[in-house]
Image (cartoon, grey):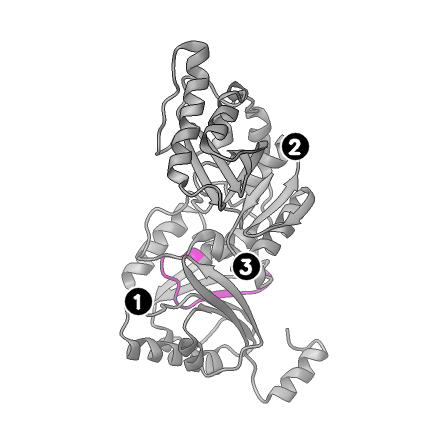
């Protein structure tokens, strides 16, 4: 199988797959390859936090033109996965000097599927772009074609708990990846001082409580396959994986509207007991709960804020980190160097990530009280986490 993800999250996803029981795990470019049975495929869709979709390769072949692709797929046994009454859609991804037009190839694959059924039954399955029964994926690298059945359907970042959102919300898969990269397991308090619609606090709670990422989803594409095992999936879905979480998760934002939206999403996810939200500007945060914790935030990058206000926001963030969050590990995702410069603190680690089309960095600031030498000595002796 192939689990797709974002650039920078491949190793985190591989670790997730190994922990789930996947075999022969190999890391690729924005993807992780692994082996497993039907149960593993169901578990991957239900539990993986950093996968966008899980593909099942069903045929690999070489082709030099669109007609060869059509003929090969027209002869493929589509009835193993679908019937003539079901709707389907096709997605084609190209990395090839031979083939140039992915849209044309998509049409040819659709024709091949429809003609295959028409030759047997005199009927064609219908194409549907929104919520089809069957999702077909064709990947072409030069002349090598790989036909996959998409077991996920809609992208797995669509968890199912989001009922409303602010403008440009953080993708759920990216949020979960950031948290896992930071080593978050629910071992301390968590705060996001610019939480927007609440994605980071919610994903933090799901990880801390060990609630499957896909538990809120209405449907996965494999549930429409002809070999779908409802009893097996129900057994996995009903399995109690939740663990206790003794700390608190806090989210705040200067926008009251954002907090109202975040509250709806938190309630939808059933996490109001664990996530505490408040409308508050970052510069107004004066105290924290406990002497240590994890802070993670995705501040605005500047598309909708005046440059002077943006730089002021990052200066305020840096000032609060230094004077309020001693003992915390603080991770900040942004993409403008001048934004990071205005935080005014030295980072100890950085990770390159893609947020949509933007090449971003997630930087770690280890906040300590006193001088660096004293901090390092306390940390070396286990007195500072």
Viewer-closest of 130 and 298? 130
Residue at horizontal 33 percent and vertical 60 percent from the top: 259
Q: Quick check: can you spot residue 239?
A: no
- Name the N-terminal-most of marks 1 and 3: 3
- The quadrant in which the N terminus is found is top right
How many angstroms separate mark 1 from mark 3 (CA)? 23 Å
Say whether residue 193 is magenta.
Answer: yes
Compute the Cα span from label 3 to label 2: 27 Å
- Against 42, is 49 above or below? below
Examine the rendered structure and indicate whether residue 317 appears above or below residue 27.
Answer: below
From the viewer's perspective, is residue 105 above or below residue 273? Answer: above
Q: Residues within 10 Å of mark 1 (few under 14, many from 20)?
A: few
The residue located at (29%, 65%) in the rendering is: 255
| Circle 2 residue | 37
Q: Which residues are magenta?
A: 187-199
Q: Badge 3: few (under 14), some or many (20 or more) residues near its Cα, within 10 Å?
A: some
Give the label on residue 8, or none.
Answer: 3
Residue 193 lies in quadrant: bottom left
Label 1 SS: loop
Seen in the image, is 134 located left or right of residue 20?
Answer: left
Give the overall secondary structure of the magenta segment: loop
Image spot of residue 184 (x, y percent): 58, 61
Q: Earlier in the sequence, mark 3 or mark 2?
A: 3
Q: Residues within 10 Å of mark 2 (few under 14, many from 20)?
A: few
Circle 3/circle 2 CB separation < 8 Å: no
The image shows residue 20, relative to residue 307, as above or below, that is: above
Residue 322, image x, y percentages:
48, 82
Residue 258 shows in the view: yes
Give whichever of discs 1 and 2 has the lower sequence position.
2
Residue 303: mark? 1
In this rendering, the count of numbered labels is 3
């Amino acid at each position: 199988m192939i689990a797709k993800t974002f650039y920078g999250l491949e190793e985190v996803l591989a670790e997730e797959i190994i922990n789930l029981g996947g075999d022969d795990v190999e890391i690729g470019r924005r993807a992780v390859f692994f082996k497993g049975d039907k149960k593993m495929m169901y578990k991957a869709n239900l539990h993986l936090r950093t996968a966008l979709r899980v593909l099942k390769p069903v045929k690999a072949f070489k082709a030099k033109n669109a007609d060869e692709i059509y003929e090969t797929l027209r002869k493929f046994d589509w009835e193993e996965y679908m019937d003539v009454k079901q709707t389907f859609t096709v997605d084609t991804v190209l990395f090839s000097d031979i083939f140039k037009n992915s849209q044309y190839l998509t049409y040819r694959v659709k024709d091949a599927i429809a003609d295959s059924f028409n030759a047997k039954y005199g009927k064609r399955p219908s194409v549907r772009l929104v919520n089809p029964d069957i999702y077909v994926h064709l990947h072409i690298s030069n002349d090598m074609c790989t036909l996959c059945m998409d077991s996920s359907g809609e992208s797995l970042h669509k968890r199912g708990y989001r009922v409303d959102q602010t403008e440009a919300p953080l993708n759920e898969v990216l949020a979960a990846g950031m948290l896992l990269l930071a080593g978050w397991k629910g071992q301390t308090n968590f705060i996001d001082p610019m939480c927007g619609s609440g994605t980071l606090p919610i994903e933090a709670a799901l990880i801390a409580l060990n609630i499957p990422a896909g538990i809120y989803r209405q449907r996965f594409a494999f549930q429409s396959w002809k070999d779908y095992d409802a009893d097996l999936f129900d057994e996995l879905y009903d399995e109690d994986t939740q663990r206790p979480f003794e700390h608190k998760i806090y989210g705040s934002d200067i926008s009251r509207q954002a907090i109202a939206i975040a509250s709806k999403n938190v309630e939808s996810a059933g996490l109001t007991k664990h996530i505490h939200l408040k409308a508050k500007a970052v510069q107004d945060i004066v105290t924290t709960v406990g002497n240590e914790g994890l802070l993670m935030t995705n501040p605005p990058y500047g598309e909708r804020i005046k440059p002077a206000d943006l730089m002021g926001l990052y200066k305020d963030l840096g000032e609060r980190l230094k004077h309020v969050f001693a003992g915390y590990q603080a991770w900040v995702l942004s993409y403008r160097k001048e934004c990071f410069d205005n935080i005014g603190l030295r980072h100890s680690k950085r990770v390159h990530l893609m947020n949509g089309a933007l090449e971003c960095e997630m930087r770690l600031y280890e906040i300590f009280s006193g001088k660096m030498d004293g901090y390092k000595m306390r940390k070396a002796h286990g007195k500072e986490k």
